[in-house]
Amino acid sequence: MTTVFVLFHTHDLGEGETDDKLIGVYASLADAQHAQARTAALKGFRDAPEGFVIDPYEIGKDHWTEGYVTVRTRRPLQRRAPD
C-alpha cells in the first residue's frame, strides 16, 4: 500500500480546547518536514512550534474502525458582577 504523510498543527487554547489545522498531505516524510519548516515561520505557528505532528497514513485503508459517541458539555456561564 502507498503511504502519505499528513502534517497537522494543534494549538492549545486552554480549558481543554484546541485549535487544530490540517496543513497538508505529502508524498514523502521529507516533503512533510519541508512543509513544516516553511509553515513554522508563519505568524501564529512560530509562537507554537511544539504543535506540529506528522502522521503516516496508508491510502485505501480505514483508519477509524470503531463507532463514536458525541458528548456535549456546557461551559458555565460567566456572569458579570452587579455594578
Image (cartoon, rainbow, N blue to C red):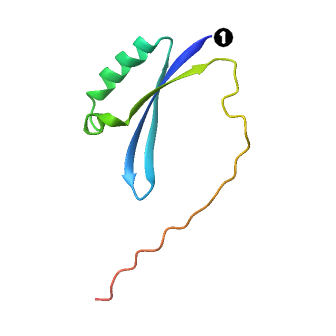
Q: Position of residue 46 (x, y in %)?
A: 26, 34
* Residue drawn at the location 38% of the way across and 18% of the way down: 33
Q: Amino acid at mark 1?
A: Met
| Quarter residue 45 falls in | top left
Vertical placement of residue 80 versus 69, above or below: below
Image position of 65 (left or right of 25): right
Image position of 51 (left or right of 47): right
| Quarter residue 71 falls in | bottom right
Judging by the rendered image, the residue that carries numbered circle 1 is 1
Image position of 81 (left or right of 73): left
> Which part of the image, by quadrant, shows the C terminus?
bottom left
| Quarter residue 1 falls in | top right
* Residue drawn at the location 31% of the way across and 21% of the way down: 38
User: For the image shown, how many numbered marks are present on the structure?
Assistant: 1
- Most distant residue in the bottom direction: 83
Q: Position of residue 56 (x, y in %)?
A: 53, 21
Q: Secondary structure at mark 1?
A: loop
Q: Position of residue 63 (x, y in %)?
A: 66, 29
* Residue drawn at the location 45% of the way across and 55% of the way down: 16
* Residue drawn at the location 74% of the way across and 43% of the way down: 67
Image position of 58 (left or right of 51): right
Vertical placement of residue 50 versus 32, above or below: below
Q: Position of residue 47 (x, y in %)?
A: 25, 39
Crowd rating for badge 1 (residues with CA inside 10 Å; few <14, some 14–19, many 20+): few
